[in-house]
Image (cartoon, rainbow, N blue to C red):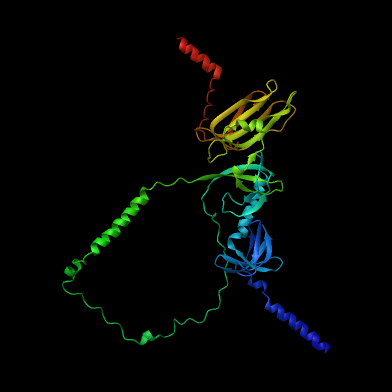
Amino acid sequence: MTLRCFIVVPALALLLAGCGSSPKDEIGQAYIAPATVNVRGQLSQKSNNVAILKHGDLVSIIDIRRRYVKIRTASGVDGWIDSSQLLMPQEMDQIRKERQHALALPSEGSATVYDALNIHLEPNRQSPAFARIPAGASIEVLGYRLAPKTAGPPERPPLKLEKPKPPTRHSRRDAPSKADHLLPAPAPPQPPPNWQQLSAERIPGSESSAERVADRAEDQAEQKAGEEKKPVVMEDWALVRTKAGECGWVLARNLTMSIPDEVAQYAEGKRITSYFDLGSVQDELKGVKHNWLWTTMSESGPYDFDAWRVFLWNRHHHRYETSYRQHDLVGYFPVHVDAAGETRDRTFELIIKDDDGKLRQRTYAFDGTLVHLTGTEDYPPNQSPPPSTAAAPLKAAQPGWLRRQWNALKRRAH
């Protein structure tokens, strides 16, 4: 009896192992794209969830049915999910490289979100959201990108998987068919001698219907060609970095830059894209204040800012005033501001596209009151322009309000 039990138990174990799916049925691997995914036990919306996976979890693909994929989790649970919620290994490797690059980018200023905000893998509304910023949280802005609002889901490589084909029976094409024993078909009859005259005659009403169809098609083509194409609505996306080190894309209009309201009130409807502290000022009445550099954007464009401005705190009038400003330009990130040193002067660098289409990095010095241009070089610095290309001359400074009024008085006197 004891020997029989020892024989039956191993046999039962082998039977159960054979009933389960073996690793040989794995046809590929993938990663979970969204923040969380519910895995259903059956290919039905009414099926119960058998597992909950998170972004970046590695799963095995064991079956494909159109847009749905049967996966196996690391714990051995099988279930079904939508293929759009998966990332191929090459996609995940690219995302990891982009995150490492974003982690090394300098911050262009902090921003606050008043409502919970999803972080997408790409600047696209249809892109998977792998993380969520809670309401009231602070994040760092790294850059911007312009993307169509009505764009479809981002183009992704298809699942390059070879689904095992079921065994097919022996083809019957080589077997003799009944058609081989039939007599050949007779030759078609010859047309009548007056076939040209018969072809010239038309059935009454056929010509008018054909003309109506042709006219309708022509009208539709003209209408389609005459319709003005609707302009593509573009949206500004911001590349952000959270305190937890998560980097991704969010809609820029949902961000509020964390510069003080005393300075933000001078934006005049423009969007503040970056800001930097240029040093503190001790005011006997207002306490400690700061000088600021900011960049703004008046309209959406394929660049990061079109104006910049330096604010200083006037200790005598107890208010912010403009020390220097430039507008109607094309600027790009990163904006570099040196760390505070022993000297009072602070320097910062801006990348501006000149009228000749070349990018140049300009260095400015701020002494607490005035801003001075101290240097201009091609960007990047290690790439020199062609010998035939000359640097564009700087624009002459415009006269101030007092000088313009004085010149107007002199013209009136003459």
Q: Determine whether 319 is above or below 65 in the image.
A: above
Q: Quadrant of the C terminus?
A: top left
115, above or below 84, in the image: above
Along the line of sight, which residue is nearer the eye, 360 or 74?
74
Residue at far right of view: 2
Residue 167 visible (yes or no)? yes
- Which residue occupies 33% across, 51% down? 222
Which quadrant does the N terminus fall into? bottom right
Snapshot quadrant of residue 191: bottom left
Q: In the image, is 256 to the left or to the right of 193?
A: right
When the figure is inspected, residue 325 is found, relative to residue 210, above or below; the finding is above
Residue at 66%, 23% in the rendered image = 369
Q: Position of residue 239 (x, y in %)?
A: 62, 45
Q: Where does the image place residue 156, in percent across and percent down from the top left?
A: 55, 57
Q: Position of residue 402 (x, y in %)?
A: 55, 17
Question: 308 left or right of 286?
Answer: left
| Residue 385 is at least partly visible in this image | no
Q: Nearer the viewer, residue 199 or 91?
A: 199
Q: Nearer the viewer, residue 339 or 65?
A: 65
Indicate left or right for 170 with 207 as reference. right
Position of residue 310 relative to residue 130, above or below, is above
Residue at 54% x, 55% y is 155
Q: Position of residue 270 (x, y in %)?
A: 57, 35
* Direction bottom: furthest residue: 1
Residue drawn at the location 71% of the way across and 77% of the way down: 17
Q: How many marks?
A: 0
